[in-house]
Image (tube, rainbow, N blue to C red):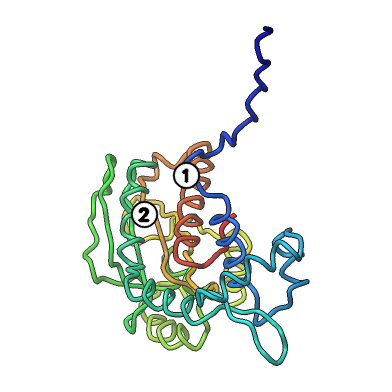
Amino acid sequence: MPAKRVKPAKPTNKRDPSGIQSVEIALRVLQTLMRQNGATSLGDLSRATGLQPSKLHRYLVSLVRSGMAGKSVTTGLYDLGPAARQLGVAAFSRFDSFGIAQERVVELVNETGHDALLYIWSEHGATLIGQQTGVHPMPMMLRLGSTVPLRRSAVGHVFLAYLPETHTAPLVLEQRGDEIEAEDDKAVQQRLEQIRKDQYYWSSQTILPGGVVLAVPVFGTQQQLHSVLAIALPVRAATQQRKAVLIKKVVEIAAALTQELGGAESA
């Protein structure tokens, strides 16, 4: 008797054999609901997720049953459900944005070798809350809780570029008396426009003698400025070639932190 012919096995998904595809699709539907401005239709969700309406509907039925999604009995539109809102509240209550940012300060030192700084905006202005020394430390250390002048520092310029003028104007006025030379306001505004375009500021305008500072904005939810990440390095290390490498690296780390803080959608 001839031996039975064995059919070749169907190719398996090599990406992650331990994953559950249906769960990943359900999460994709939830993420799409999250990104909408409000309740949305089955057709709009189908176009946004790339799922056929019949297939998408089956997922929505399960999500509604679990409370992760909701469906209006009057409009038939879908939105996030009560369980999803409870999950969001629980996640937010456990979320330590500044703790996450501090981890990026350590990463900055590891990736660049230079002193790394983390500033937030407080009632006193641009305030240092995190600092790590690099392998090429600056001769002068800054004290945690100290502030920098807004128009005479790289970090201050980033805050000026992204915060409402109502927040910064009183401090700018107060600090004018400390400026050796009052700079033309038009020149400052042009510089702030360039910072918003580049999303970084590289400057020798620093309170650190013989130093250069690269400051990059970090955004939180609703694209509000969360903090400013910066590195400080000696002028002798600030070659044009090194400058390009550092800008790329620090901007990448700040962008990753922005994404972690909910300031940008995941790719």
Q: Residue at x 40, y 57 (%)?
A: 230
Helix, strand or loop at disc 1? helix
Which amino acid type is marked by label 2? Arg
Q: Amino acid at mark 1?
A: Leu
Element at label 2:
helix
Residue at figure coordinates x 46%, y 85% from the top left: 167
Image quarter in which the C terminus is found? bottom right
Report whether 132 appears left or right of 48.
left
**10 Å crowding of disc 2: few (<14), some (14-19), many (20+):** many
Q: Residue at (32%, 71%) from the top-left corner?
A: 94
Q: Nearer the viewer, residue 11 or 6?
A: 6
**Which is more N-terminal, label 1 or label 2?**
2
Labelled disc at residue 104: 2
- Whole-percent x, y for residue 16 in the image: 51, 39
**Foreground pick, 155 / 122:** 122
Q: Residue at x 50, y 74 (%)?
A: 66
Q: Nearer the viewer, mark 2 or mark 1?
A: 2
Residue closest to the far front: 1
Q: Position of residue 14 (x, y in %)?
A: 57, 34
Picture layout, residue 30 above or below residue 4: below
Quarter of the picture holding the N terminus: top right
Viewer-side residue, 264 vs 169: 264
Q: Which residue is mark 1?
A: 246
Q: Is residue 238 left or right of residue 115?
A: right
- The residues bearing labels 2 and 1 have C-alpha atoms spaced at a distance of 15 Å
Q: Nearer the viewer, residue 72 or 253?
A: 72
- Placement of 120 over or under 142, stated as above or below: below
- The numbered dot on residue 254 is none
The image position of residue 266, as x and y in percent, is 56, 58
Q: Quadrant of residue 137?
A: top left
Label 1: few (<14), some (14–19) or many (≥20) C-alpha neighbours in 10 Å: some
235 vs 149: above or below: above
